[in-house]
Image (cartoon, rainbow, N blue to C red):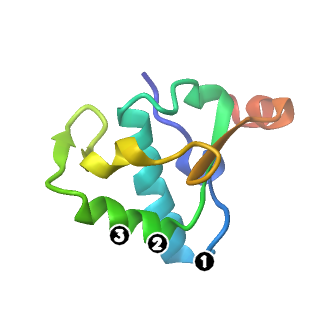
Amino acid sequence: MSNPDWNLQVKTGRGRNDTGAYHRAINIAQQLLAINRWPDHSGALIVIHNAYELHYRLQLSGSGTYRFEYNVTVYPGIHDLIPGQDYEIHPLPDSLQQNYNL
């Protein structure tokens, strides 16, 4: 399994759009990948909404479990995120797939 191109395939949506939000969005995307909520990551991009708030909620949801194969701590609250509300998965445009060899 190859990792997504985090810089290309993870975007921030509603909410703050600064470097901190982007880093939190990547962490949330890693957790979603680890629980198979982003199964076709090679052909898709993910938009994380309100990354600061979601990241905070996840950390308060209980003790996380480290998933070494994804190099991420998965918090219990990740299972409660709602597709379309907390995050969206969109097909990666063909031009980007070809340009970046994804």
**Mark nearer the viewer, 1 or 3:** 3
Mark 2–mark 1 distance (CA, rounded to whole Å): 8 Å
Q: Sequence-wise, which precedes: disc 2 or disc 1?
A: 1
Instruction: Name above or below for residue 100 compared with residue 78.
Output: above
Q: Quadrant of the N terminus?
A: top left
Cβ–Cβ under 8 Å for marks 2 and 1: yes
Q: Position of residue 67 (x, y in %)?
A: 22, 37
Q: Position of residue 56 (x, y in %)?
A: 35, 69
Amino acid type for the residue under numbered disc 3:
Tyr
Tag 2 residue: 52
Instruction: Name above or below for residue 19 compared with residue 59.
Output: below
In the drawing, what numbered circle is on residue 56?
3
Tag 1 residue: 16
Where on the picture, by quarter, is residue 19? bottom right
Res. 102 in view = no
Q: Position of residue 23 (x, y in %)?
A: 46, 65
Q: Secondary structure at mark 2?
A: helix
